[in-house]
Amino acid sequence: MASDHDGIWAKYRLGDFFQFPEGRKRHEEFPGTIIHEYYQRTSEPGDYKVLREVIDDVRSIRKIEIPKRDCCVIHLRTGDIIDNSEFTVDEFLSKKRYYIYDHEKEAYKKKKWNQYVKTGRYYARVLKKLKRLKIGQVSFSYNLDFNPFPKTRTRRNHRSENNEKSIDYVQRIHDLFRKESFQVVKYERHDVDHDFIRMCSSGFFVPSGGGLSRIIVRMVKLNGKRVVKGEW
């Protein structure tokens, strides 16, 4: 499969293409992907039974290794959501922040779907839950370069030229877990499909905000595994 950085692949939005009719119209632009295979089997978006079958087949063909049973996989939403935002990493960690800005109302859209980046308090609660479950290993999955909508209008209408804030955010979350004596299992990210399948196949999964995490949550539950959230 092509790299995430290769031209049109940067526009591959697995979550959106699975959930919305746009995927049915555009899947042929992305041959060899989960989404292309999915729409070979059904014309309807959002069919989790079909998606599960595709995941199982692709995982077998590509020989994707699944996480160990006692390792919790944590999805971090990074990239444009953090780097193009006006908020600092400290501000993201301190309270819920939103991304899409309504310029007519001069306010952020305070909707659940618009709150992608989880706070420090969220992960503090995750820590407590994992300790009760006697989970001592965690592995993080994220994409520092994700930016499918470069023209999205944030409050400052700003496009970052680097991903320094995303890197800092990831490091801060890593440090939070290490401080509490969790072993952070290093994982070198691959392409989107590989990372997605790995997260869906985890025995314990911590979601971030956004549509992709919501899909993974559903798949993890369908597999009879455990989803751990930092919300009571």
Image (cartoon, helix red, strand yellow):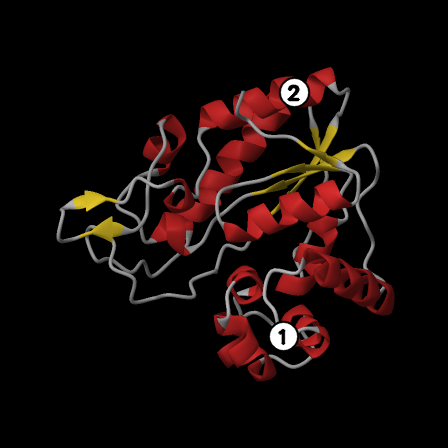
152 relative to 212 in the view: left or right: left
| Picture quadrant where residue 18 is located | bottom right
Q: Quadrant of the C terminus?
A: top right
User: Residue 44 or 124: which is nearer the viewer?
Assistant: 44
Under circle 1, the secondary element is loop
Q: Position of residue 96 (x, y in %)?
A: 36, 32
Label 2 belongs to which residue? Answer: 129
Q: Residue at x 73, y 74 (%)?
A: 41
Q: Quadrant of the N terminus?
A: bottom right
User: Residue 18 or 66: which is nearer the viewer?
Assistant: 18
User: Residue 165 or 200: which is nearer the viewer?
Assistant: 200
Q: Is residue 51 visible?
A: yes
The numbered disc on residue 43 is 1
Q: Is residue 12 above or below residue 75?
A: below
Whichever of callouts 1 and 2 sits on the residue coming sooner in the sequence is 1
Do tag 1 and tag 2 residues touch (Cβ < 8 Å)?
no
Q: Mark 1 or 2, which is nearer the eye?
A: 1
Q: Is residue 77 above or below residue 193?
A: above
89 relative to 179 in the view: left or right: left
Under circle 2, the secondary element is helix
Q: Is residue 30 above or below residue 161?
A: below
Q: Position of residue 95 (x, y in %)?
A: 36, 28
Cα–Cα span, label 1 and label 2: 39 Å
Q: Residue at x 48, y 72 (%)?
A: 22
Q: Residue at x 40, y 30 (%)?
A: 93
